[in-house]
Amino acid sequence: SLRTAIEKARAANMPKDTMEKAIKKGAGELEGQSFSEALYEGYAPGGVALLIRCLTDNKNRTAQEIRHTLSKYGGSMAESGAVSWMFERKGIITVAKEQISDLEEFQLLAIEAGAEDIKDEADPIEIVTSPDSVSDVKAALEENGYSLSYDMSYIPSNTLKVEGSDAGKLFKLLDILEDNDDVQEIYENSDIDEAEMEALAEQMD
């Protein structure tokens, strides 16, 4: 995905103290600070829809920063509900392929527990569930000895083809948003050609 490409391009350049701070913040371990979650909606260049999940100790400050970044890099803030309807809230469970000796048996186990979709092309395998079923699927897999990671995500109902200068602007905007300490996750509905995505990621190195 576009976000994965950006993360890979950035990973080697993240200072250790920045990474540790991000981990502590996510776990609510920064002393003297109380954080709450906020979800901001917006548009990126090319009309791409954005959902930006933040963890902040000051929602007004974070909203202003997100609005400023979007405006500066060719996007715009949207009203609540303007973008979120384009996404579905889903549970995402990932399991490393090396744990799976019988893929068909694994798939059957997940489906019987409530999985909606299983994406097994990449490693780790990704299991998509409804928000209500994620706990059941997680429990079924763990009871059968699988180690896993899970999170809640927003999956776009439809994607939007983006190319050329709009793709470059989108990549830049997402990179800048990722620089904001308050930003935890960015969900977007772009469809960018893989070769173009790789070229954009290389430009960041």
Image (tube, helix red, strand yellow):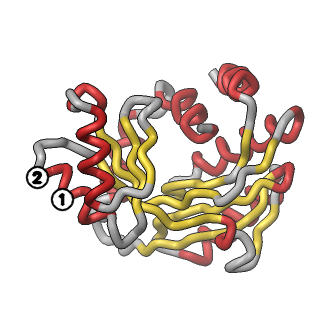
Q: CA distance from mark 1 to mark 2?
A: 6 Å
Q: Is 21 on the left-hand or right-hand side of 5?
A: left
Q: Return the x and y of residue 10 as percentages of the image width and height.
A: 54, 31
| Quadrant where the C terminus is found in the figure | top right
Position of 55 relative to 145 (above/below): below
Quadrant (top left, top right, bottom left, bottom right) of the N terminus: top right
Q: Is residue 169 left or right of residue 155?
A: right
Amino acid carrying label 2: it is Glu
Residue picked out by circle 1:
139
- Count residues near mark 2 (Cα–Cα under 10 Å), then give few for <14, some for 14-19, many for 20+: few
Disc 2: which residue: 143
Which secondary structure lies at badge 2? helix
Which residue corresponds to the image point at 32% horizontal and 54% vertical from the top-left? 111
116 and 183: which is toward the camera: 116
Q: Position of residue 178 (x, y in %)?
A: 58, 47
- SS state under label 1: helix
Residue beneath the point at 44% across and 51% down: 117
Q: Is residue 138 above or below residue 194?
A: below
What kind of residue is marked 1? Ala
**Residue at the location (52% across, 75% down)?**
58
Q: Residue at x 76, y 44 (%)?
A: 170
Q: Quadrant of residue 33?
A: bottom left
Q: Residues within 10 Å of mark 1 (few under 14, many from 20)?
A: few
Mark carried by residue 190: none
Q: Position of residue 28 (x, y in %)?
A: 30, 64
Badge count = 2
Do the residues bearing badges 1 and 2 touch, measured as CB atoms within 8 Å?
yes
Q: Position of residue 31 (x, y in %)?
A: 28, 65
Which of the 4 image quadrants contains residue 147? top left
